[in-house]
């Protein structure tokens, strides 16, 4: 099975990074979350209800819809915050990317650890610009709002292709497919990672880290 | 074709499509209410949340949707459409977008109805939620209130996109294949927002759209969220300030909903022009305009707020002050595009406020003297001035304006004197004020 990979690129002002990332990550997660599963005796299950909430952005002319779950929102905000701090501290020209990866766990026999097999990866590339005056900022507010709208349409297009989705799991397997740690919704298993591109256009440190991690994971 | 589908599956599929259509309408209309939507997730299934999504059902909207469907389901050639339009307080209206739920012939026989189709319809509804916040009408709907309201209309049958103007764009929300056809959801939205006046005071809002069934009753439900304000019109090009005093017929269709903290309560008026819906008190009643008697030109000019209606590219509001007895009337715009050539709006560089000391060095009652006198006297021809049409020409005005006579209280030798005088007179003033303290209190109470 091949892993689907989608890339979205946005150019934003420094104070818009948070909201732009939240908007796109939440839009993706909205489509990749279901209600909580409740398994019944006969091997069937029922699904809880997912609520939605509109979120207005303060620095962008944009409103996005997210899943109504404070826990999930906290997790995503924390990740975005770390990404933003890394962007600020890196001293690079403000380029980086944040990745949202949906994966399945495949249990392996000891001594090998469980494999994480991604089936869909969304990469959001960010380019941060600095603007000189208020007028440019105002234009940027609107332009970034429009751009995010286009990205949401792109996301919806991809989702709508109805390509591979993990099979609905039995009760024993549910943790290999879904993140069951939240109490009100159940997104597919996901992980968020980020990379800061240094001025050379390559990201040396994280590449090294990833190589080492992959080697050890074998 | 249907023989492959078990009766139970067929029944389920019909039910899914029916409720999908109803939920689609709810999502679209709620997204144009002008408020933020928030529903709660619930881990324990309630059994009544279709597609495992918490989408509220506004009763009036469901009622309209069911009426439009009239017991049928969206099928091939029978699309369900939700048309979103904007209507200004002046009665002009414009279609903004049309959401279409269609069915085509492409069947997916192998798909499992009760499971895959259901889940995909659920995802499609989520996509719909996301896309409804992205089209241009969303921002407009969030700002509705004083100047305009957003209306919706549901119809069943052939899709009509002609009201969207030229160059409308289409966005596809998604498709779901089923054994009886493919469900498609898309939105066509207007991009050309130049306002076309569709004012038709005697015409009902339902109109005679081709292809709409007879039972169509246009539901003109508006979602204003704030009390209407008085608006003043100016006359058309070249005219005097005159405003029609009677409200337009279409105004009767406007309904104002109760305040914001009771979401979901919408009153709708039938299109028979029933005025009941206008439930505002007399004070706040929105009027189409006010008649202004020409004998109060100054007042009308002063009160005129140049309020540009939504989507107006070129404001058609002009005043000619030529027939009004005002100074500089000749310089007021003459039925031209008033923005560019209004000399009153082109102020000269206003002089920086001069300190008293500096000022007293310059003009001691000097008029027309000042910095210019230090130089060779050149005939001052300011831009846009006319040739001596009036006693006071623009050049003289500029000069006077730049060198105003000093305020007596600011000139040094007088100011010190007045300070001493003030101090001396203070006790006397205090005595007077204390004597009249009751009067002052009464005055303050009156103000409050």
Image (spheres, coloured by chain):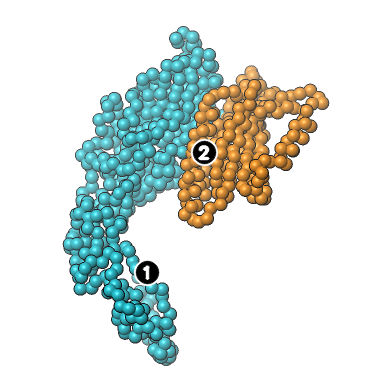
Q: Which residue is mark 1?
A: B349
Quadrant of the snapshot with the N terminus of chain B: top left
Can residue A185 be seen here? The reply is no
Q: Which mark is residue A11?
A: none
Q: Which mark is residue A65?
A: 2
Nearer the camera: disc 1 or disc 2: 1
Compared with B18, B362 (above or below) is below
Marked residue chain, label 1: B
Q: Provide residue B151's location: percent of width, then percent of height.
A: 35, 38
User: In the image shown, does B142 or B247 lie closer to the viewer?
Assistant: B142
How far apart in space, not on screen, are marks 1 and 2 (Cα)?
A: 50 Å
* Secondary-structure class at tag 2: strand
Query: Count of labels shown?
Result: 2
Q: Residue furthest front?
A: B376
Q: Provide residue B258's location: percent of width, then percent of height.
A: 38, 45
Please report the residue visible at 45 percent of the width from the left and 22 percent of the height from the top.
Answer: B183
Horizontal side, residue B66 vs residue A52: left or right: left
User: In the image shown, does A87 or B311 lie closer to the viewer?
Assistant: A87
Please report the residue visible at 58 percent of the width from the left and 27 percent of the height from the top.
Answer: A47
User: In the image shown, does A54 or A24 lie closer to the viewer?
Assistant: A24
Question: Residue B78, located in which quarter of the rendered image?
Answer: top left
Compared with B201, B106 (above or below) is above
Question: Residue B393, located in which quarter of the rendered image?
Answer: bottom left
Marked residue chain, label 2: A
Please report the residue visible at 22 percent of the width from the left and 52 percent of the height from the top.
Answer: B237
Q: Provide residue A35's location: percent of width, then percent of height.
A: 58, 30
User: Which chain did the image draw in cyan?
Assistant: B
């Amino acid at each position: 099975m091949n892993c689907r990979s989608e890339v979205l690129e946005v150019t934003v002002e420094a104070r818009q990074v948070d909201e732009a990332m939240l908007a796109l990550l939440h839009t993706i997660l909205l489509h990749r979350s279901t209600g909580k599963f409740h398994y019944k005796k006969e091997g069937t299950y029922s699904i809880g209800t997912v609520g939605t909430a509109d979120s207005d952005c303060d620095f962008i002319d944009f409103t996005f819809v997210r899943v109504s779950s404070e826990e999930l929102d906290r997790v995503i905000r924390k990740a975005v915050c770390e990404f933003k701090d890394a962007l600020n501290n890196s001293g690079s020209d403000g380029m980086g990317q944040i990745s949202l990866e949906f994966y399945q766990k495949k249990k392996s026999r000891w001594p090998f650890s469980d494999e994480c097999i991604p089936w869909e990866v969304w990469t959001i590339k960010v380019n941060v610009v600095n603007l000189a005056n208020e007028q440019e900022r105002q234009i940027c507010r609107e332009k970034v709002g429009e751009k995010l709208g286009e990205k949401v349409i792109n996301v919806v297009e991809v989702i709508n292709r109805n390509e591979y989705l993990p099979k609905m799991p039995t009760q024993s397997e549910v943790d290999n497919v879904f993140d069951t740690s939240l109490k009100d919704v159940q997104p597919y298993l996901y992980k968020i990672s980020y990379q800061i591109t240094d001025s050379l256009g390559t990201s040396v440190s994280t590449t090294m880290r990833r190589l080492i991690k992959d080697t050890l994971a074998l | 074709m249907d023989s492959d589908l078990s009766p139970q599956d067929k029944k389920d599929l019909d039910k899914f499509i029916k409720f999908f259509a109803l939920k689609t309408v709810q999502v679209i209309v709620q997204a144009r209410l002008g408020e933020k939507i928030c529903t709660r997730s619930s881990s324990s299934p309630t059994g009544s949340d279709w597609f495992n999504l918490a989408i509220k059902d506004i009763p009036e909207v469901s009622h309209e949707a069911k009426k439009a469907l009239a017991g049928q389901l969206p099928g091939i050639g029978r699309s369900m459409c939700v048309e979103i339009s904007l209507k200004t307080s002046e009665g002009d209206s414009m279609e903004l977008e049309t959401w279409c739920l269609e069915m085509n012939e492409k069947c997916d026989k192998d798909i499992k109805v009760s499971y895959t189709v259901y889940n995909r319809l659920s995802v499609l509804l989520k996509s719909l939620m996301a896309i409804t916040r992205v089209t241009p009408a969303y921002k407009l709907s969030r700002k509705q209130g004083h100047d305009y309201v957003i209306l919706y209309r549901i119809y069943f049958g052939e899709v009509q996109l002609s009201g969207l103007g030229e160059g409308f764009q289409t966005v596809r929300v998604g498709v779901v294949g089923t054994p009886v056809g493919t469900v498609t959801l898309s939105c066509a939205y207007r991009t050309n927002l130049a306002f076309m006046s569709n004012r038709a005071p005697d015409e009902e809002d339902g109109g005679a759209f081709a292809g709409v069934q007879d039972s169509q009753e246009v539901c003109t439900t508006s979602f204003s969220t704030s009390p209407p304000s008085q608006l003043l019109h100016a006359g058309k090009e070249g005219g005097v300030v005159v405003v029609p005093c009677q409200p337009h017929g279409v105004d009767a269709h406007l309904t104002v909903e109760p305040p914001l903290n009771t979401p979901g309560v919408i009153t709708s008026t039938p299109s028979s022009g029933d005025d009941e819906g206008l439930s505002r008190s007399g004070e706040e009643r929105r009027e189409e305009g006010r008649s202004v008697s020409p004998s109060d030109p100054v007042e009308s000019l002063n009160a005129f707020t140049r309020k540009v209606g939504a989507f107006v590219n070129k404001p058609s509001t002009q005043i000619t002050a030529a027939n009004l007895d005002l100074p500089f009337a000749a310089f007021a715009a003459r039925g031209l595009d008033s923005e560019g050539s209004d000399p009153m709006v082109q102020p000269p560089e206003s002089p920086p406020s001069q300190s008293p000391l500096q000022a007293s060095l310059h003009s001691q009652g000097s008029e027309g003297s000042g910095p210019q006198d230090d130089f060779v006297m050149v005939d001052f021809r300011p831009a846009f001035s006319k040739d001596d049409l009036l006693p006071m020409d623009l050049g003289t005005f500029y000069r006077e304006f730049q060198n105003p006579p000093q305020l007596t209280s600011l000139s040094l030798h007088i100011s010190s004197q007045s300070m001493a005088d003030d101090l001396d007179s203070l006790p006397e003033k205090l005595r007077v004020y204390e004597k009249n303290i009751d009067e002052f209190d009464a005055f303050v109470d009156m103000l409050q």
